[in-house]
Amino acid sequence: MKIQKIIASALTVAAIGVTSITANAADTIKIGEINHYKRMAAFAGPYKNGIELALGQINDAGGVLGKPLEFIYRDDQGKPGEAIKIAGELMTRDNTVMLTGTILSHVGLAISSYAAEKKYLYLASEPLADSLVWAKGNDYTFRLRASTYMQAAMLAEEAAKTDAKTYATIAPNYAYGKDAVAAFKDALLKLKPEVTFVTEQWPALFKIDAGAEAQAIERAKPDAIYNVTFGGDLAKFVREGTTRGLFDGRNVYGLLTGEPEYLEPLKDEAPEGWIVTGYPWYDLTDKSNKEFVDAYQAEFNEGPKIGSLVGYMTAQSIAAALEKAGSTDTDALVAAFKGLAVDTPVGQIMFREQDHQSTMGAFVGKTALKDGAGVMVDWVYKDGADYLPSDEEVMKLRPASQ
Amino acid sequence: MGLFVAQLLTGLANAATLFLVASGLSLIFGVTRIVNFAHGSFYMLGAFIGYSLMQVLPGMFGFWVSVLLAGLAVGVIGVIVEILVLRPVYKAPELFQLVATFGVILVIQDLALLTWGADDVLGPRAPGLKGIVRVLGEPVPKYDLALIAITPFILFGLWYLIAKTRLGILVRAATQDREMVGALGVNQAWLFTGVFFLGATLAGLGGAIQLPKGGADLLMDFNILAAIFVVVVIGGMGSLPGAYVAAALISILNVFGVTYLPQSTLVLMFVVMAVVLMIKPYGLFGREEVAGEHGQVGEPERPIKPAGIAVRLLVAFGIFLLALLPWFGSDFAQVLTADVIIFCLFAASLHFILGLGGLVSFGHAAFFGGGAYVAALLVSYLQTPMEVAFLLAPIGAGFAAFIIGWLCMRLTGVYFAMLTLAFAQLIWSLVYQWGEFTGGDDGLVDIWPAAWLNGTTPYYYFTLFFGIGGILILRHVAHSPFGYALRASRDSARQAEATGINTKRIQWAAFTFAGALAGLSGALFVFSKGSVFPTELEIGRSFDALIVIFLGGVKTLSGAVVGGASLEYAKDFLTRFEYWRLTLGLIIIFVVIVAPEGISGTMRKMAERVGIIRGREGDS
């Protein structure tokens, strides 16, 4: 242990908050937060802000279990192997009580598998992959954000209300895109079996050839388009599609398109009349939502992103679980997370016992232009609990719970 | 018909940016022989600078002036990079400069983040060219037509510059034989600087001119890198018309691929490159590389010899210390060291073909990830016991290397490197696309070692045994007759053939052997992490290994291990800081400049200078 201590003290410059194992009576409760802070800086930054805001409020109110709550942030370079190495370090050397974080689904899946193997608790905050709680779900992993399936089902419900019969889909060519298309198809065909999908476009992630994609979709002459592209791909797709009149007279459904992360960069070229999931923070008036938005704006001088909300709710959920468990013991925390109810800006959410998915929902609305910026109008908040498969289906989807 | 024409036009418009950026890369490579990884960064800077200028300069005039100024500004940045970073290392071994350009990438990434922030920016539309024109009834954006019209002028201008001016004559002469140009009294340094300026300017122009079709973001540097290398190789290194034809070919094929085979987007250009290279080994318009260009820069390599008693003792002591680690180190120290050993074995296996064989592979990750996937697939689908899967992984990877080696062996130099890259990308996209079987980018999870190994310390010893064992085997083989034959094939293929060595077969065997050992490291990796994802097959993974070899010293046997260990430990430490990429980039550039023979080579020199016979090799 001695040498370890010497190494540790040498590394304190690195601000990693090392404490020796003997100093178990640490004066803070530490949470290991792993994210792609550099690789996806635009998303991880607001997320971290959200956590910091919640931590400030929690600790001002006396912390949890009588101690301040602290997050240790580590950058995994977007690599699953690195993330696992860091997870091990956080849990064994930094004495964090649990792990959280990641945006990219594959990194989330890697940590989830590692957590189950090592019996560490992992709260997957942002990764969307359905398999995280279903096909590859395990006892030690919980997920906060509304999954791909849930958000796609919300859009499918809207789509089913229209007369559109033929659909085109466009999604980045990787697992999230494929899941999102499959979920939308599944949900829409259940509601409206006569619908046909006339073309499926799969641009490479962040390498879209938007002109060609727009032409290919136009060629299929669909009644409606379902879009899963985001970020730079979305911007290019919107610009080429608008220029070429692709969206004229068509219903367009955009998964995540309404999230400020993606809508804001489009400025006055944001598409109008798309049905999207997103986060209309500028429009929220109810008490809990408004309080969060105001506090966030006061602290950071900018509007919150969806990542900020997720970060805030992550810290809230962890604090609530710690209070419920009454200890920092992993098994107690796992038990506490099952069925845990948390009061959040979007209302009360619950971490379901059957699949460890939270019931956090999403805002669904229509895009519009207001003062030269894209916004969501006519939106409603849809509770995630209503868009999850039945318990029997979940049982089938989730081998771990059988 | 209308759609067909419209698609052709879309393809040609897309080709404009690709051509501009790729022609810059081609020029730089043709004259300076530098594989400029930072070219994507120049492209990104062009986009960001162009965007900033367009915010200040209004109107149509402002737009085009911004594009030009952005190009020139990036040209100046290119000159700064050339003078500060590359000029000191021109005398270093071939391809060494790519390490320096890798450092530049890291520095530029963080500086761009600091300057322009993390958010994507949407490029402004070109004033006056916002609408569409109907061509045979199909809508075609005006800006697309402008791009199609501009590109031939740029091509012609460049062609005129190269073919008709004195500067161009010098550039062409330097492309053919730069030593002779130097001997004739041309100031090579300024010629190189000039070419770098031109190349960087073209990249910057490419970045700025694509703004109305997209925007600027912090991932665009890496995103365009593979595409421009493909274009340069298909067109033929150093050929401008080739770059144009290849850019048009790739872009147009891509447009039709999107329409008729939407799943093809990941892999199409690599298939095209592989096909072109197998039919025309030097690209469409390229010439055979001039013999004698390679392996002669810098001081000649000294013959290797088995380690002396002192070094052996030192290595034995190092291994002994590693074996004791579980007694004095934490769990994490073991995990970290195991990671480093795995990476060092991977790098050492590449070093074996690169250093000893002179075969530069840009696709070595195919065998690392390949081995990992072989093991993971066996465990996932056949419930193969871990021990068996572990042993089958290197065999599977070796088999892949056997096939790919056979396909690539007829090429040499950079073309060989690019063909290995193409095949690695094919494997990557196969794994990525075939989600039902490989899990796609959600990977394969829950691949844990057998119960008797399932703990940090047992697995650490397991890694130590196979990792260090693999490295020692590589070292041993280097001193075997096979290793000598391999070096003979590298240094003088003709003389080696004359002595009865079948050089191609020797190199093929070495490629297979290195692939198998990369597969071994991949197997160690997958069971230590419990999961595998296509990231382990990516270009970036191959380049990681490439970079540490040069960082450690390509001309020393221990280079890969020293470089790998140094970089991995440095990364582990530095990623705790906010601007770790900037710091790491600067450190890499610093090391490159003060130690142009790599860490290991320079330490050996210093050790010799002060009287110790050898440096502390193998101390990892």
Image (tube, grey):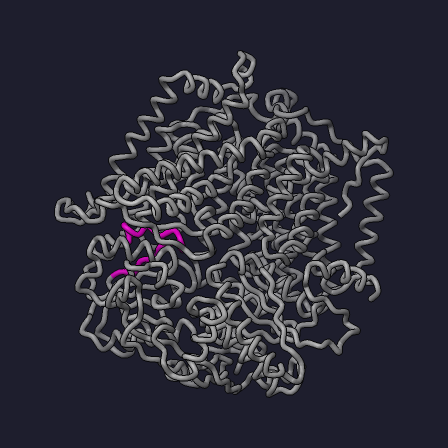
Quadrant holding the N terminus of chain A: bottom right
Does residue A301 appear in this view?
A: yes
State the image quarter where residue A262 is shown: bottom left
Q: Nearer the viewer, residue B185 or A46?
A: A46
Residue drawn 38% across and 54% down? B121
Residue B466's place in the image compared with B359, above or below, is: below
Q: Position of residue B557 (x, y in %)?
A: 72, 37
Image coordinates for residue B199, horizontal then vertical, percent: 44, 32
Looking at the image, residue A228 lies above or below residue B291 = below
Q: Nearer the viewer, residue B172 or A183?
A: B172
User: Is residue B397 positioned above or below B188 on the image?
Assistant: below
Residue occupying image coordinates x 55% and y 64%: A35
Res. B515 in view:
no
What stretch of residues is rendered in magenta?
Answer: A199-213
Please, is residue B325 above or below residue B145 in the view?
below
Q: x, y percentage for residue B120?
A: 41, 55
Q: Is residue A209 magenta?
A: yes
Based on the picture, tell me whether residue B341 belongs to the magenta stretch. Answer: no
